[in-house]
Image: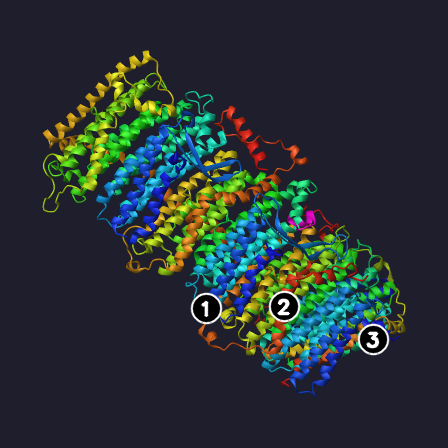
């Protein structure tokens, strides 16, 4: 295990790569691609190696920490001088998200190999810069630093959509940026307010202060702060009704952009909820959980229903993300260990499966230059392999057991059911609907006779595409079968999030009578106590 | 005991076969594909036989024999292992699945020989075997669910095998989605079980559930709810009311598929699950009653539709639905072993029926409409003979398999007193009526197909007997359809019911007192006689209508136009679903959710904010009129504002309370 | 009413009338003359207050130099009667009322305030011109020197703006 | 009678600028070479910065407290000096292209800079007034420097009329304050009766006058017209220099006069909101880049006013106002760098006669001149306030100041404005990178930038990134306790 | 003996009339004159305060204001000449090329 500023290297290696790309001649496309690929691959391998080694199984806290004082605040030299710190660290949750990011970057670069023909150099630079931002978001332990990366990531994504996107790319790009900024700038106000209350931007310090009771936010303040953070994350996720940027952004983005957007960027929102909303504002989280769950459930069903009737294949996949991410949010705000782990798993699974779907949609686009399903039909005949891959990925997306989508969805629903059976029941409708829209669209695209003459001669997957897709398939299968590898590592971190939520009640809590935990009406009293015991056992057992 | 220690090998072989054929088979000739697929299933069958052989020598305390391989999902207190288990129930299922499955594989090599996508077909079929084996061997609900969903997938793939046909693709999709609706319940059932028992392992769940007090009739306690939810899953998979609609459509798939998946194995998974969860169900009398009623209702409902169908496979499909209803009826009245017994015999004769029908279709060059057949009995003798055997079996003529299994179900139903003293009689009555109808429509099928005038154009269709690769399985299944029920035969002369006894360790019971047994014995004989008479009546009507008076059915149809068309259109259930669920859902999704809420509502709001900002911007911009006098006025306004604020607003106290 | 007060009122009336005339006259030259009237009236008021140095400067610099410049420019540009265009709706509708409101407010605020500064009476004692000059060259030498650059800028500006040919 | 040496040394920067201004006027008839004149001007501007050396080491009041050489004024002295250097470098090729006289131009820039220096260091209102006039009158002339074009003259005239109008208010305010307090020295005003009506009125009038100079709404009304009409390097100067200096005076009055702190809070609150909205909304539909940037500078004035409101509500509390001061100063610095850089690019692209200022003229710039487009994007993103740019940290500190003073709603309004602002900055980037240029523009050869412009762009771009990443040194300087040497 | 407030009120009135003139008149030169009127009003206030407080610095300010006014006048009239020359009009309302 090498020592040194590993996380910094992980964050800035792609930036170095981008710099190196800058030095290449801009018409030397082949070497630009190769270099970008090499950098991203190196990044992926390093992230696998360092993070898996550096964050041992069962460790709850932050590992591989790096800490430097960075920007001073407050009167110079006085006692009240504080600092914005350069504070990095990884735990079980961020670990896999980083790996997902680095992996999908490799995939994005590979899938853009042929399909990007204009401004090739800039394209790959943007992809690498995007990686910097996203990895930075997942590894930051300082609120300021987090926000910094959060915003940095906007710019490359904006360019990716705006320059290399499709017809309405500019509208989509601007919408994407404005939507995201609308949320994040309020989050900035929230971050500053939190700083004002705590005197630091350092996440572990604040967490610690909240844990020990050294810091207690007044109820109103906590509520507003929670909302400031939550709305920013909800827009990113995107949670209904903040989702309308997503279909546009996805449809207009180039394939690589869609893959990164769906695969990683959306996860930043849910990651933020886990990392910030819950530990920092537990009471507000608890108070808002029912409302958020309702939104999540609406999102699940609504996203699925709207996906069902989309004539545009890419838009369909985009709306399916709304639905899937609804599950994640639900899992987070059920405050149950199982659902929390399910949510984390689902984030990863969705990254792979929806990433895969976008890849495939992109491959169709490369061949036919359209997303309209009416233009397809019967494609399984000219390209059986692509059809097979598509089916496989679609199945993983609709949550077929043994594939990755199932594990996350199942755990989320299972965990949610343990505390709020009705939430889970409503959300499970999404499971039905996902089958509806995916299979129906699959049928419309691949089954039947070929109706459009052009489609008869479309080439099947190329060797390069086959490598990408096969990798995705293998990972999908592995995650579906060997999920313990991941859940085992996220367990302690997820537990610690929930532990932080369960800190001792404070003065004002006493005034509000604690509502008894809702029991499902149908459970006889005998089994109810049994269940409670189970729950408490569960908490004890996994600590 | 080598195989019992390596149970995984049984499901894994078909998976390997599937993978090999699926990935590499595309370029191979049919022979190699055959040998891979048959080798995999055949070996799997042999291993299964060996496993069963070893199993019967196991001491009882080691049953169920559970083998854990690795932890599949673990989160918090939840843990789902990849674990296989084998007990008596599994043994029955295992033999049915691998045995019938293997036969159908053989049959398929003949049937599919001239179809495109040969390797694909066998790859799917092997994959199906894998999932089905997982389903029956799983040691916990989650792994069972893997098989459950997996077979659904294979069903989807195989129904839609002829994907160029829209109807086939539609049917596959419909099957999957309807199944998903059932799975919705199944999953919630699992969640509730986990919540109640803290685990989903069969052994633990059942051992914990055993001592619990059973719910009273009409009480919706945890177990009742859980059972009902599980049963919801079963209605989807096993095509019961109201989720049966996919199964008739599933006949779009190749006929071997219909035989294997949609008759013999997959569709019985629901029965299997109910039987597997019998410990829970026996604690939930309400759920039991629901199961019995739904099963019974489905049986009669499907049978009536079967009366008038003209597509040979559709008749069989409705017959399957009806027979599955029987099985649920058995489970619902607590006769789990009878249900499983019928499951097994049904697997034999219904597979046979389908395969024989396939052979007919094969002979007719793809024609499925019975109105265009007739008089085939002399041309395809083997097919005719086996088909007749199966028909006799399903109609319940002794001593064929169907007689015994159906008889024990009706007997159990008659005796049931769950939900009131007369419930059992009513269920029995309906069951008997169903038997009558079954006998009728099956013989109708036989008569229409094999007897009467030849109603097809001989110049176009060259009727020919199928190859031996197809006939072989037919013969074997015919034999099984005859002897498959003999396990239970001794009961008729006062001997033990070997089948029930074998399953005894799983379902319990079986040891009834001698006195009741004696009384029951005479009753059983009576009921059996009634059943046989019923079957004969059914046969008689069919004979009269289709052999003696061939014009009569049409006249009858005309005279009872309303009923006839209703039946022909399957009670308009599909149309009903389309009108009440599918169309409104699509309409709402398109026009309300997407166009109104999403585009006009949310996006409209967002864009509205943007455009109002722009128009506000335009207003602001137009204050820049370029006229210095206006500007001067603005300065004056500003001056007034500043002065007013400073004069008339309270002076700011340092750190005002704002924002706090 | 003391003579001073009487003189004050006369001069004040003159100044206000001059200002009104500045507003109401249509020809710029008349406005300029009105302004000169105001300035002279103000010079008189300065004298009344005893600030005779300021009064002198007012007459010489303001009335003499600056206003002459104005008149000169008016002549140079041959400015005619002002055309009363009404392009600016804002100024046309709200301009006068708002400006008058400002005027009223300023006057009212000053009138109603009872500051110590206002309590004093204008004694008319002779301002010490020497004191002024001392102050100018000692305390305020820095701004005084800066004004020289200001004038330099003004010259420069006049050259840059008004010269006809490019250099 | 004659001032002592330390007095003179403490105002050395202003003197150097004035001196070089006069020197340039003297050289004008003698030296024909533009390069030489430019060099002299740059040396003069730089000399002013260097002239701070004494003040840095010996801070303190000069001329019996009329001006102060404290870290605050030293900061501004550097800032306006830097702006002057950059503007001169930008202007050199511009003047050559437009065939305008340069010695006068440079002299005026230096005089204006001196005026700003005075304004920022004045502790006495009359001196401030003289400084203000020195910079304003120079500015009026500079605005009309392209005198053969209608727009330039119009710009000059509007600026002059409205500017003088506002100056009169400012002056009347001084008079009233003087009347109440008997002094014009800021440091001697604490004794004033804080309930005095005249004092209120006087401070209100001062605020009006300075509000005009910093372009606070509704006094912002002149800004777009004047900025658009003025020669672009002059616009760069306007947006960075006089504004900063006026803010400096405002801040100093604020810090030194307790009554101002008391009375101005709500006025700032309201002015800030109005200004932000006026600037951002007005810019939304702009198609003229120069005018767009003008509106943007109004918006930025609004952001700075937010920090002013924060200062007001902070005074005399346990947190101390220094972070808010630092926020304002830091913001002015970053903003000045970025704005000058942006206007420099605009001045180059305008082409002869400043014809190509429409947004469409920038179409396809990302491909035609990637470096320039990248740098302009950097400036725009900095103005927009995205991280890694100086603009982000500037905005961040203002947000922080506002939140620290519990002005949450003001912060939220500012946030909303940032989003509105994002739209039009991004629109420019959209045009540069995502629009195909018209045939005519595509055919025109990429304009090669002269060396001096490249220097300006390099300095500003590096500054825009440097202060975004490593602001600590600057902040530590600004956060020092004796920023205002009282 | 005249109360200082009289002078101050007069100065306010004159200042206000200057403002009125500024928004009322269209001729650039006259508008400029109204600014001069305003400055004169300020001067009056300065002198009045100076006298009331018996401090002579107020009168010094007046001198400065007059100098500044002179400088402004020079530049302002230059600008006016420039405008008039370019546009052949002194009407401020016709000078509206820059707008929106």
Relative to B160, A267 lies left or right: right
- Density class for disc 1 (Cα within 10 Å; few <14, some 14-19, many ≥20) is some
Corner quadrant of residue D332 = bottom right
**Residue D162 to residue D308: above or below:** below
Describe the colour scheme in one phrase. Answer: rainbow
Magenta span includes D185: no
Q: Nearer the viewer, residue A169 or A97?
A: A97
Q: According to the image, label 2 marks what residue? A: D462
Residues in magenta? Answer: A195-203
Q: Are callouts 3 and 1 both on one chain?
A: no
Disc tally is 3
Quadrant including the N terminus of chain E: bottom right
- Density class for disc 2 (Cα within 10 Å; few <14, some 14-19, many ≥20) is some
Give percent across and percent down for residue B469: 21, 41
Q: According to the image, label 3 marks what residue? A: C56
Q: Are marks 2 and 1 in contact (CB under 8 Å)?
A: no
Q: Does residue C59 appear in the picture of this structure?
A: yes
Magenta span includes A196: yes
Give percent across and percent down for residue B588: 39, 43
Q: Which subunit holds the residue at mark 2?
A: D
**Which residue reaches farthest front?**
B1
Q: Nearer the viewer, residue B657 or D154?
A: B657
């Amino acid at each position: 295990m090498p020592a040194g500023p590993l996380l910094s290297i992980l964050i800035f290696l792609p930036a170095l790569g981008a710099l190196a790309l800058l030095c290449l001649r801009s018409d030397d496309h082949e070497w630009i691609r190769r270099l970008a690929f090499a950098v991203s691959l190196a990044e992926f391998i390093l992230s696998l190696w360092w993070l898996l080694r550096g964050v041992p199984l069962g460790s709850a806290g932050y590992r591989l920490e790096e800490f430097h004082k960075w920007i001073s605040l407050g009167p110079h030299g006085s006692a009240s001088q504080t600092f914005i710190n350069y504070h990095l660290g990884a735990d079980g949750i961020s670990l896999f998200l980083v790996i997902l990011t680095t992996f999908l970057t490799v995939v994005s670069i590979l899938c853009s190999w042929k399909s990007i023909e204009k401004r090739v150099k800039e394209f790959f630079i943007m992809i690498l810069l995007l990686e910097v931002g996203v990895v930075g978001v997942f590894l930051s332990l300082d609120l300021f630093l987090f926000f910094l990366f959060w915003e940095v990531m906007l710019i490359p994504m904006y360019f990716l959509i705006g320059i290399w996107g499709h017809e309405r790319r500019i509208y989509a790009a601007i919408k994407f940026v404005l939507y995201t900024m609308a949320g994040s700038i309020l989050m900035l106000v929230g971050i500053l307010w939190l700083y004002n209350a705590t005197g630091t931007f350092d996440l572990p310090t604040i967490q610690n202060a909240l844990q020990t009771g050294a810091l207690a936010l007044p109820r109103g303040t906590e509520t507003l702060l929670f909302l400031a953070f939550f709305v920013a994350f909800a827009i990113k996720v995107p949670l209904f009704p903040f989702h309308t940027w997503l279909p546009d952004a996805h449809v207009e983005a180039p394939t690589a952009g869609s893959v990164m957007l769906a695969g990683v960027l959306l996860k930043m929102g849910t990651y933020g909820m886990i990392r910030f909303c819950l530990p920092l504002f537990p009471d507000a989280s608890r108070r808002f959980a029912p409302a958020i769950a309702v939104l999540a459930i609406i999102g699940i069903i609504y996203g699925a229903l709207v996906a069902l009737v989309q004539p545009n294949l890419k838009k369909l996949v985009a709306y399916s993300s709304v639905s899937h991410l609804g599950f994640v949010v639900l899992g987070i705000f059920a405050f149950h260990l199982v659902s929390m782990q399910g949510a984390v798993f689902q984030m990863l699974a969705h990254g792979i499966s929806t990433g895969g779907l976008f890849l495939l949609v992109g491959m169709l686009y490369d061949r036919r230059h359209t997303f309209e399903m009416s233009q397809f039909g019967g494609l399984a005949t000219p390209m059986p392999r692509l059809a097979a891959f598509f089916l496989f990925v679609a199945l993983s997306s609709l949550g077929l057991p043994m594939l990755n989508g199932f594990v996350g969805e199942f755990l989320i629903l299972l965990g949610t059911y343990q505390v709020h059976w009705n939430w889970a029941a409503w959300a499970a409708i999404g499971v039905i609907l996902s089958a509806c829209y995916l299979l129906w669209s699959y049928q419309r695209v691949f089954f039947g006779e070929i109706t459009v003459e052009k489609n008869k001669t479309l080439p099947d997957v190329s060797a390069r595409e086959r490598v990408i897709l096969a990798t995705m398939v293998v990972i999908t299968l592995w995650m579906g079968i060997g999920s313990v590898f991941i859940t085992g590592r996220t367990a302690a971190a997820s537990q610690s999030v929930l532990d932080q939520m369960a800190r001792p009640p404070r003065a004002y809590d006493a005034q509000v009578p604690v509502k008894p935990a809702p029991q499902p009406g149908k459970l006889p009293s005998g089994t109810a106590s049994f269940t409670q015991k189970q729950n408490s056992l569960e908490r004890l057992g996994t600590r | 005991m080598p195989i019992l220690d390596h149970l995984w090998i049984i499901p894994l072989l078909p998976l390997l076969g599937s993978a090999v054929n699926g990935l590499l088979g595309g370029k191979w000739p049919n022979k190699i594909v055959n040998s891979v697929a048959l080798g995999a299933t055949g070996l799997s069958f042999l291993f299964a036989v060996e496993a069963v052989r070893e199993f019967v020598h196991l001491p009882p305390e080691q049953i169920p024999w559970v083998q854990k391989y690795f932890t599949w999902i673990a989160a918090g207190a939840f843990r789902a292992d990849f674990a296989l288990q084998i007990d008596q129930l599994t043994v029955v299922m295992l033999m049915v699945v691998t045995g019938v499955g293997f036969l159908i594989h053989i049959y398929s090599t003949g049937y599919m020989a001239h179809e495109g996508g040969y390797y694909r077909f066998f790859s799917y079929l092997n994959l199906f075997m894998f999932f089905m084996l997982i389903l029956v061997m799983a040691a916990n609900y989650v792994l069972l669910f893997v098989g459950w969903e997996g077979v659904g997938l294979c069903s989807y793939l195989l129904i839609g095998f002829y994907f160029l046909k829209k109807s086939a693709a539609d049917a596959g999709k419909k099957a999957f989605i309807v199944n998903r609706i059932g799975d919705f319940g199944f999953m919630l059932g699992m969640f509730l079980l986990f919540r109640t028992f803290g685990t989903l392992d069969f052994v633990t769940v059942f051992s914990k559930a055993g001592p619990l007090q059973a719910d009273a009739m009409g009480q919706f306690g945890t177990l009742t709810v859980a059972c009902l939810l599980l049963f919801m899953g079963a209605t989807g998979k096993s095509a019961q009311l109201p989720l049966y609609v996919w199964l008739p459509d599933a006949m779009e798939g190749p006929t071997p598929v219909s035989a294997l998946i949609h008759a013999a194995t997959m569709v019985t998974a629901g029965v299997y699950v109910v039987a597997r969860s019998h410990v829970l169900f026996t604690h939930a009398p309400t759920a039991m009653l629901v199961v019995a009623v739904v099963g019974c209702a489905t049986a009669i409902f499907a049978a009536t539709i079967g009366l008038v169908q003209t597509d040979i496979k559709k008749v069989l499909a409705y017959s399957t639905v009806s027979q599955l209803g029987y099985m649920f009826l058995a489970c619902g009245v607590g006769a789990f072993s009878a249900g499983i017994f019928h499951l097994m015999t049904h697997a034999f004769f219904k597979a046979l029926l389908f395969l024989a029908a396939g052979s007919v279709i094969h002979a007719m060059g793809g024609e499925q409409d019975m109105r265009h057949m007739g008089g085939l009995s002399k041309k395809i003798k083997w097919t005719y003979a086996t088909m007749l055997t199966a028909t006799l079996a399903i109609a319940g003529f002794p001593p064929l398999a169907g007689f015994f299994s159906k008889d024990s179900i009706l007997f159990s139903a008659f005796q049931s007193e769950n939900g009131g003293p007369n419930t059992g009689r009513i269920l029995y009555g309906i069951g008997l009526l169903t038997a009558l109808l079954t006998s009728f429509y099956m013989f109708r099928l036989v008569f229409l197909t094999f007897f009467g005038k030849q109603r097809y154009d001989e110049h176009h269709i060259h009727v020919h007997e199928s190859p031996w690769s197809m006939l072989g399985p037919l013969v074997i299944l015919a034999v099984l359809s005859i002897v498959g029920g003999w396990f239970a035969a001794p009961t008729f002369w006062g001997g033990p019911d070997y089948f029930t006894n074998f399953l005894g360790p799983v379902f319990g019971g079986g040891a009834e007192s001698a006195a009741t047994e004696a009384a029951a014995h005479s009753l059983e004989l009576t009921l059996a006689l009634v059943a046989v008479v019923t079957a004969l009546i059914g046969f008689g009507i069919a004979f009269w209508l289709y052999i003696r008076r061939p014009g009569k059915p049409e006249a009858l149809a005309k005279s009872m136009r309303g009923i006839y068309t209703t039946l022909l259109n399957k009670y308009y259930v599909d149309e009903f679903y389309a009108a009440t669920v599918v169309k409104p859902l699509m309409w709402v999704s398109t026009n309300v959710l997407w166009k109104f809420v999403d585009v006009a509502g949310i996006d409209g709001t967002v864009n509205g904010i943007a455009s109002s900002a722009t128009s506000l911007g335009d207003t602001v911009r137009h204050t820049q009129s370029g006229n210095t006098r206006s500007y001067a006025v603005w300065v004056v306004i500003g001056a007034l504002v500043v002065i007013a604020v400073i004069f008339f607003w309270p002076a700011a106290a340092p750190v005002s309370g704002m924002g706090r | 009413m003391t003579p001073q007060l009487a003189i004050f009122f006369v001069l004040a009336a003159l100044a206000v009338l001059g200002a009104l005339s500045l507003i109401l006259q249509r020809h710029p030259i008349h406005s300029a003359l009105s302004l000169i009237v105001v300035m002279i009236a103000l010079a008189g008021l300065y004298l009344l207050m005893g600030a005779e140095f300021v009064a002198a400067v007012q007459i010489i610099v303001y009335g003499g130099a600056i206003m002459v410049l104005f008149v000169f420019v008016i002549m140079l540009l041959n400015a005619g009667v002002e055309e009363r265009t009404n392009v600016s709706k804002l100024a046309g509708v709200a301009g006068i009322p708002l400006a008058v409101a400002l005027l009223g407010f300023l006057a009212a605020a000053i009138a109603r305030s009872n500051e110590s500064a206002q309590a004093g009476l204008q004694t008319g004692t002779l301002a010490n011109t020497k004191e002024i000059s001392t102050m100018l060259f000692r305390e305020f030498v820095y701004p005084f020197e800066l004004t020289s650059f200001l004038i330099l800028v003004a010259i420069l500006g006049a050259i840059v703006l008004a010269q006809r040919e490019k250099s | 009678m004659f001032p002592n040496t330390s007095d003179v040394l403490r105002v050395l920067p202003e003197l150097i600028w004035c001196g070089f201004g006069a020197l340039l006027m003297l050289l004008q008839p003698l030296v024909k070479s533009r390069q030489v004149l430019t060099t002299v001007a740059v040396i003069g501007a730089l000399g002013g910065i260097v002239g701070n050396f004494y003040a840095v080491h010996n801070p303190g009041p000069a001329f019996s407290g009329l001006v102060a050489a404290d870290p605050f004024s030293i900061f501004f002295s550097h800032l306006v000096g830097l702006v002057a250097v950059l503007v001169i470098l930008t202007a050199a090729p511009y003047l050559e292209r437009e065939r305008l006289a340069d010695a006068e131009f440079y002299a005026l820039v230096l005089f204006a800079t001196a005026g700003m220096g005075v304004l920022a260091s004045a502790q006495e209102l009359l001196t401030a007034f003289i400084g203000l006039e020195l910079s304003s009158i120079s500015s009026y002339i500079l605005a009309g420097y392209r005198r053969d074009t209608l727009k330039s003259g119009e710009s000059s005239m509007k600026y002059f009329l409205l500017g003088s109008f506002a100056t009169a208010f400012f002056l009347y305010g001084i008079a009233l304050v003087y009347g109440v307090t008997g002094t014009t020295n800021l440091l001697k005003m604490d004794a004033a009766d804080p309930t005095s009506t005249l004092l209120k009125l006087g401070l209100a009038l001062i605020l009006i006058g300075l509000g005009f100079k910093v372009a606070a709404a509704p006094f912002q009304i002149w800004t777009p017209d004047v900025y658009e009409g003025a020669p672009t390097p002059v616009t760069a100067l306007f947006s960075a220099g006089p504004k900063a200096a006026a803010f400096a005076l405002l801040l100093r009055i604020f810090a030194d006069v307790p009554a101002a702190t008391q009375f101005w809070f709500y006025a700032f609150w309201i002015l800030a909101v109005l200004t932000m909205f006026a600037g951002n909304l007005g810019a939304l539909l702009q198609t003229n880049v120069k005018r767009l940037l003008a509106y943007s500078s109004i918006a930025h004035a609004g952001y700075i006013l937010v920090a002013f409101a924060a200062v007001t509500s902070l005074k005399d509390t346990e947190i101390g106002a220094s972070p808010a001061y630092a926020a304002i100063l830091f913001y002015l610095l970053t903003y000045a760098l970025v704005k000058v850089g942006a206007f420099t690019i605009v001045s180059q692209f305008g082409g002869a006669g400043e014809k190509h200022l429409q947004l469409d003229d920038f179409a396809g710039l990302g491909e035609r001149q990637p470096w320039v487009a990248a740098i302009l994007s950097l400036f725009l993103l900095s103005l927009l306030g995205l991280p890694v740019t100086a603009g982000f940290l500037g905005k961040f500190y203002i947000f922080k100041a506002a939140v620290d003073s519990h002005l949450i709603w003001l912060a939220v309004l500012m946030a909303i404005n940032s989003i509105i602002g994002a739209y039009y900055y991004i629109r420019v980037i959209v045009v540069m990178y995502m629009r195909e240029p018209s045939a005519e523009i595509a055919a025109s050869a990429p304009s090669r930038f002269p060396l001096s412009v490249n220097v300006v762009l390099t300095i500003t771009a590096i500054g825009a990134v440097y202060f975004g990443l490593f602001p600590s040194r600057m902040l530590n300087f600004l956060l020092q306790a004796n920023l205002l040497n009282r | 003996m005249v109360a200082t407030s009289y002078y101050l009120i007069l100065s306010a009135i004159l200042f206000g009339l200057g403002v009125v003139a500024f928004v009322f008149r269209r001729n650039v030169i006259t508008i400029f004159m109204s600014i001069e009127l305003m400055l004169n009003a300020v001067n009056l206030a300065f002198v009045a305060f100076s006298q009331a407080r018996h401090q002579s610095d107020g009168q010094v300010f007046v001198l400065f204001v007059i100098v500044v006014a002179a400088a402004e006048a020079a530049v302002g009239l230059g600008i006016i000449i420039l405008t008039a020359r370019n546009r052949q009009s002194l009407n401020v309302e016709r000078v509206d090329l820059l707008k929106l």
